[in-house]
Amino acid sequence: MIRGSLLICVEINVYGILRLVVKLLSDIGYRIKCIRKENNLNQIQFAKSIGISQGNLSEIEMGNSNPSAETLISIRTQYNVNINWLLTGVAAEDGTTYEDQFEKRLIEVFRKLDDYDKNEIIEFIRVKINLRSI
């Protein structure tokens, strides 16, 4: 089963042939490449704008290395990209990333509880987990 979202990116190869690329959003390098292309920048221009070398950017885009925290923050700042989307490929309107709809619903309801009820729910979950391990 494939989980997650798809990213659709338009690329023009060296021969000027336009192609539509659809990839799973599990590759941070590919997301960074699409941000660069969306802004019509070559690797040298984009790398300079985020404070890294073109070689480093190339390695990141190919998936051979991961960007540093500083690089991610720079991309987020320079290009107004949701950091959760950049890291995971999934982003909610409030910037929070959820594993699935159950987790999202649980957190939404949990946030509406007072501290006493929150602690009670946490203890209930702990008891439930302990009972499963018996």
Image: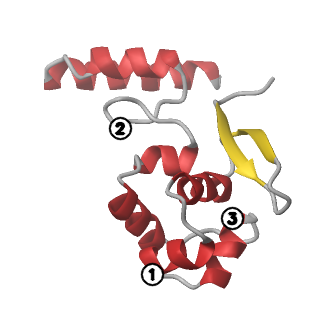
Residue found at x 43% / y 75%? 49
Q: Are marks 2 and 3 in contact (CB under 8 Å)?
A: no
Quarter of the image with the C terminus is top right
Position in image of residue 60 (x %, y %)? 66, 69
Q: Nearer the viewer, residue 80 or 69?
A: 80
Q: Given this view, does label 2 or label 3 mark the residue nearer the observer? A: 3
Residue type at mark 3 is Glu
Residue position marked by numbered label 3 in the rendering: 61
* Up/down of 116 relative to 10, above or below: above
Q: Is residue 77 left or right of residue 1?
A: left
Q: Position of residue 93 (x, y in %)?
A: 35, 29
Q: Position of residue 51 (x, y in %)?
A: 45, 81
Crowd tier of the residue under label 1, counting other residues whose Cα lies within 10 Å: few below 14, some 14–19, many 20 or above? few
Residue type at mark 1: give it: Gly
Which residue is nearer to you in this view: 92 or 30?
A: 30
**Lower sequence index among marks 2 and 3:** 3
Q: Which one is closest to the eye, mark 2 or mark 1? A: 1
Give the farthest residue toward the right.
Answer: 15
Locate the N terminus and report the quarter of the image it occupies. Answer: top right
Residue closest to the far front = 16
Is there any visible trace of residue 133 in the rendered image?
A: yes
| Sooner in the amino-acid sequence: mark 1 or mark 3 | 1
Q: Which residue is mark 1?
A: 51
Which residue corresponds to mark 2? 95
Tell me which numbered mark, 2 or 1, is placed earlier along the sequence: 1
Q: Secondary structure at mark 2?
A: loop
Left or right, 90 with respect to 96, comes to right
Q: CA distance from mark 2 to mark 1?
A: 25 Å
